[in-house]
Amino acid sequence: MERHIHNTSRIPAPIGPYSHGVFVHGKLFFMSGQIGMRSDGSMAGQDIETQTKQTLLNILALLDSAGMSAANIVKTTIFLKDLNDFGKVNDIYGEMIGSEPPARSTVEVARLPKDALVEIEAIAVVGV
């Protein structure tokens, strides 16, 4: 299997033994989950709106560093600390991901790294 690790200094450094993303066969790009953390390691804010926006900015920066955009995303998974925040997250996600959104799953979880309120992971395809 052809596999290439992709990291960028444009988003927070991994806080564990993982990579920002992995290209498989030069076509599929699997991105690790991102939270609302700035490049300096601080959380963007304590509210769901601020954290969601920063989370998506991190994903878009990671895609850009890999030569792609939101249009290349084919699947996302959203992990929410509180499913009652679904509407707020959905509004921001819709604004930032575009008019042809990818497939998506959303689940509520007990806890996220750094006690974040939201985490989003994505899969993108080169040339979509």
Image: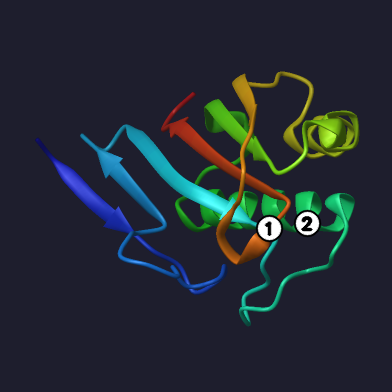
Mark 1: few/some/many CA within 10 Å (<14, 14-19, 20+): many
Do labels 1 and 2 touch, CB within 8 Å? yes
Up-down relation of residue 108 to residue 54 (above or below): above
Quadrant in the picture for residue 109: top right
Q: Nearer the viewer, residue 35 or 4?
A: 35
Left or right: residue 121 compared with residue 39: left
Residue 54: numbered disc: none
Residue 51: numbered disc: 2
Q: What's the amino acid at mark 1? A: Ala
Q: What's the amino acid at mark 2? A: Gln
Tell me if I can see residue 95 in this picture.
no
Up-down relation of residue 72 to residue 45 (above or below): above
Q: Identify the residue at horizontal 54%, vertical 31% (top origin).
A: 72
Mark 2: few/some/many CA within 10 Å (<14, 14-19, 20+): many
Number of numbered callouts drawn: 2
Q: Identify the residue at horizontal 33%, vertical 60% (top origin).
A: 18
How far is mark 1 from mark 2, CA to CA? 8 Å
Per the image, label 2 sits on a secondary structure element best described as: helix
Q: Nearer the viewer, residue 73 or 108?
A: 108
Residue 42 x/y as whole percent = 69, 78
Residue 97 x/y as whole percent = 73, 34
Mark 1 vs mark 2: give the one in front.
1
Instruction: Please report whichever mark, 1 or 2, sits nearer to the chain's N-terminal start.
Output: 2
Residue 61 x/y as whole percent = 60, 57
The residue indicated by pointer 1 is 116
Left or right: residue 16 compared with residue 76: left
Q: Nearer the viewer, residue 109 or 36?
A: 109
Tell me if I can see residue 93 in this picture.
yes
Residue 4 x/y as whole percent = 22, 51
Q: Nearer the viewer, residue 3 or 47?
A: 47
